[in-house]
Image (tube, rainbow, N blue to C red):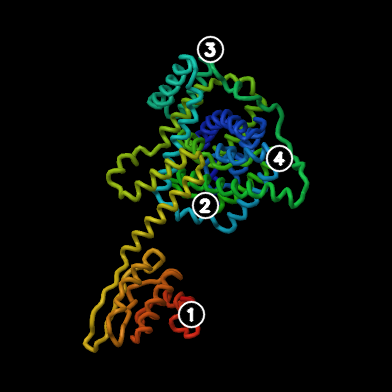
Amino acid sequence: MKYSIKREWFSNVRGDILSGLVVALALVPEAIAFSIIAGVDPKVGLYASFSIAVITAFTGGRPGMISAATGAMALLIVHLVKDHGLQYLLVATILTGILQVIAGYLKLGNLMRFVSRAVVTGFVNALAILIFMAQLPELTNVTWHVYAMTAAGLAIIYLFPFLPVVGKVIPSPLVTIVVLSIASILLGLDIRTVGDMGQLPDTLPVFLLPEVPLTLETLKIVLPYSVALAVVGILESLMTATIVDDLTDTTSDKNRECKGQGIANVATGFLGGMAGCAMIGQSVINVKSGGRTRLSTLTAGLLLLIMVVFLSDWLKQIPMAALVAVMIMVSIGTFSWDSLAKLKTYPVSTNIVTVATVVVVVTTHNLAIGVMVGILLAAMFFANKVGRYMAVTSALARDGARTYTVSGQVFFASAEKFNSSFDFKEVIDKVVIDLSRAHFWDVSAVAALDRIVIKFRREGTEVELVGMNEASSTIVDRFGVHDKPEEVEKLLASH
């Protein structure tokens, strides 16, 4: 137990505190921007980011991952806020958390094993593109000073780590923010700053109960939004957890992450914040800056609150160009450049899944839709591939019986091929179907077997099934009708 606490909290103290500071600085403009997208006061997003980060530090299943208010969640609540107001948003946030906790106990996190590597790669590349695109408004219709500051920021980010000793100790994004802020203040540059993003809160969040009627009508209003928020939140959090797993070469508890995100959202709703989830951009910043344990997540949340409430006068002077440079670094670091080279060597189906995921996410700005499209395409290609490996051969025995030998997986994708592999026009007394090398997976396969047996028997041919394994026998006995005369009559009567 002591070893686990030390490993998850205090095995990388200096790196976690410094990386947490970088993340906290980068969280401020994003939380404000997401609040504006959702149509709520900036403090709603800032309180949410503080609350979710701090709570998931204790309850989440992925140490070192950053969770806060996100753009994906903000986009889902625009119409709820517009039509019904902030109080209904708080109720939706609480209900979202409850649904996510239930999902955790139902172990829905295990479903991540059905997400193929091609989908994850597409998800990562799409997010990298979206992160870069989100910086473009800060780089359009601006003075040359902004471009100079951004370029200087990128130079510091990539060159500072080469300095002996100090380059390895202090995260270069933190150096970038500090140096460019000092330069902007000393030179008196008239460029956009964090203070221009919106009004920062000047008080700590307080516990409050949403002022809405506790009626069925309220539930009808918020439930559709909460379901959507819960699904997107879980999906984005689990995908981000998978990416951080890869970056740190460690594992995480996906079901605990579901519950942790849910607990954080429930608490956030009572603290006046909006629903949130894991953030891939901030998580990558954290990892690239040296953050590894839960302490980095806790530090980011606590420093965020301290800065926006007590150090807002200093915080407002940070130039947006510094944060843009950091986010461009995140975009470059997030994109899987290796995947471009592998387009030539990977199967066409894998490339289609990856590209489709990228295109849909970037086009719709909806991570859930893109990932779902990728998963469906991957499933279709897999089913088609496995279905092609099913084969039926036949041989005529000395006693005049024909033996059909089935090899491979029989399921919905291969059922038609299975059915067309038998010659029903051949005049023969007996047919033996050898299933010792086959496996029946679903009712489509069972229905195909029923049709084959019934067709042969209708032609006066005796049919014998041999070699069926126990699992296939179980599903065939349960759903098959070829050995149930009354069911066969019903089947024939319906045709």
- Disc 3 marks which amino acid? Leu
Query: Distance of mark 2 from mark 3, alpha carbons?
Result: 47 Å
User: Which residue is the extreme one toward the left?
Assistant: 398
**Residue density around tag 2, few if under 14, some if 14–19, many if 20 or more, within 10 Å:** some
Query: Distance of mark 1 from mark 2, alpha carbons?
Result: 53 Å
Q: Secondary structure at mark 2?
A: loop
Disc 3 vs disc 4: which is toward the camera? 4
**Mark earlier in primary sequence (1, 2):** 2
Disc 2 vs disc 4: which is toward the camera? 4
**Mark earlier in primary sequence (2, 3):** 3
Residue at the (61%, 20%) spot, across then down: 314
In the rendered image, the vertical position of residue 437 relative to residue 314, given as above or below: below
Q: Secondary structure at mark 3?
A: loop
Report the side of 209 relative to 164 (left or right): right
Kindly identify which residue carries mark 4: 84
Q: Residue 446 at x, y = what percent?
A: 43, 73
Kindly identify which residue carries mark 2: 253
- Disc 4 marks which amino acid? His
Report the side of 357 relative to 49 (left or right): left
Residue at the (54%, 29%) spot, across then down: 26
**Residue density around tag 1, few if under 14, some if 14–19, many if 20 or more, within 10 Å:** few
Per the rendering, the mark at residue 293 is: none
Kindly identify which residue carries mark 3: 189
Q: Nearer the viewer, residue 446 or 151?
A: 446
Residue at the (40%, 49%) spot, across then down: 117
**Mark earlier in primary sequence (3, 4):** 4
Per the rendering, the mark at residue 493 is: 1
Q: Secondary structure at mark 1?
A: helix
Q: Nearer the viewer, residue 18 or 242?
A: 242
**Residue density around tag 3, few if under 14, some if 14–19, many if 20 or more, within 10 Å:** few
Residue at the (67%, 31%) spot, across then down: 41
